[in-house]
Image (spheres, rainbow, N blue to C red):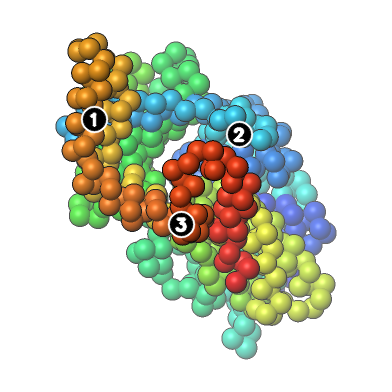
Amino acid sequence: MNEYEIVIVGAGPGGSTAAKEAAEKGLKTIFFERGRTPGEKNSSGCGLGPRLWREFDIMKEINSKDCPSIREGRAARNYMVDSEGKVTGYIMTTPTSSVEYEPAKSWITLNCYRSDFDPWLAKYAVEAGAELKTSTLVTGLLKEDGKVVGVIDEKGEKYKGFVIGADGAVSMVAQQSGLRQRWGQKQVTLTLQYDFECSTSKIDDVMGDEALAVWWSATFPAAYQVFFNSSFHIGFGNWMTWWDRNPVHYLNKVINLDYFQRLIRVLDAKPREFQAHLLPWMGMPVNTHTDNVILIGDAGGFPCPLEAEGIYPAMVTGRAAIETAAEAISACDTSKQFLSLYDKKWMETSVGEDFKSGPELQSIWMALPFSPRQSMSWFVPLFMEILGGIIDWSEAHPVRIRQVARRIKQYLPQLVPFIVKEVIPLLTSVLGEDRMDLLTDPEKLLTAMPEIEEAITKAFTSEEED
Ligand SMILES: Cc1cc2nc3c(=O)[nH]c(=O)nc-3n(C[C@H](O)[C@H](O)[C@H](O)COP(=O)(O)OP(=O)(O)OC[C@H]3O[C@@H](n4cnc5c(N)ncnc54)[C@H](O)[C@@H]3O)c2cc1C
């Protein structure tokens, strides 16, 4: 029997962060990875969010020598694709002036391959003193009197200690500890993507800083594109809500767009790999711990309830789990009851903030961009009419304005129910029913801004107060 204080299943971003934090606290720690190296078994690439740099000092050390796939996503293109499959416009976005810290002011995401990032992160845990066992599948939980006391690997080797389930979306630890059966269909999303290779210089020339893109359309769910140093991904994220056909059918619609094909030609890009992964996507994680066990990252259902950003939540919950486990071990109480401290800890982080406000915003999110047939079919032409219609030389401007207004009128049957069902309830919950008159009076609105700001904060924290 191998005795440890902390036994971590999985060396993804969550597992490696937990291993590093545990080793730094002087806890005897082992972490297991079924791949030959961390990152080998994961989706090939990701965008790392700037909150990681704000809260994890090691992120400042990431560099293109250790992680050659790195590319900064300083700007994002938002392509509008009409129901005929034509790109009718695109808007480029960059970090806005309300962003408060570096590097969030400079870029939206730092794009990086997991085969670079995961080993880079795991190295810090090993340097801190954690033992990493790769090419080792953990197949079961070790139990005494029905309680989890450790893990068993595929060779039958036993490891005793406090168990951290960092084993991703299809978590063995979650299922064998009784915290969860398989995910329900509404708790997960299927993320599928193609990986294309192309030269660094072509991406520099064609895309420049615009290393991110979202393709919004009425004929497929919103598709994301992420550029790395010499490759890119095109895929569907947490927005895949159509299950009437094989999702690959819809992904192929994206890459078969004339505009996309042109992009492939100018980039001289070659398809390299197809990937499909499950990703938890929940309004609120539940059952995150039991006696002697804590789930972190995807295993616990922590990807952001809006955009399914998952690396940052995995690392934050990895840290919170170890803080909790260390306190539990020193109090000689690793009971489920004591470990509820874990929920308190992660709810106090920025990950908890996201979950507090998730449900209201998720509702709008799902209603507009991610119900392509119901809403993007009118939103794309409406938006393009407003954007492109006024600056047009086909007629005298007053004539054009009348034409645009007449066209917009056609979309009112879709627009009005959307406003009534989605926008007004959100505004009412924030402002209060009796203050809706503020919306029609700019002067009153300005003077009421501090009050509105307070109401927004209160609305999004009401769950905690309840
Ligand atoms: C296609 C796709 C794109 C994504 N893009 C982004 C993005 O751009 N930005 C972002 O922030 N998030 C992104 N995410 C989400 C993000 O990848 C996850 O939320 C994040 O990786 C979760 O980290 P984790 O450590 O909890 O789990 P994982 O990264 O899944 O790591 C779990 C590790 O455990 C190992 N493992 C599993 N079972 C066992 C076992 N029994 N024994 C031993 N080892 C085991 C696995 O091999 C793996 O290395 C994306 C997800 C997908 C699928």
First in residue order: circle 2 vs circle 3? 2
Q: In the rendered view, would you say 169 is above or below 51? A: below
- Disc 1: which residue: 405
- Disc 3: which residue: 428
Contact, CB < 8 Å: mark 1 with mark 3?
Answer: no
Q: How many marks?
A: 3
Residue at horizontal 20 percent and vertical 13 percent from the top: 395
Residue at horizontal 23 percent and vertical 46 percent from the top: 414
- Figure quadrant of residue 149: bottom right
Contact, CB < 8 Å: mark 2 with mark 3?
Answer: no
Q: Crowding at label 2, few (<14), some or many (≥20) Cα neighbours within 10 Å?
A: few
Is 423 on the left or on the right of 26, as rendered? Answer: left
Which amino acid, by three-letter code, is at mark 2?
A: Ser
Residue at horizontal 22 percent and vertical 40 percent from the top: 411
Q: Position of residue 261 (x, y in %)?
A: 26, 24
- Disc 2: which residue: 98
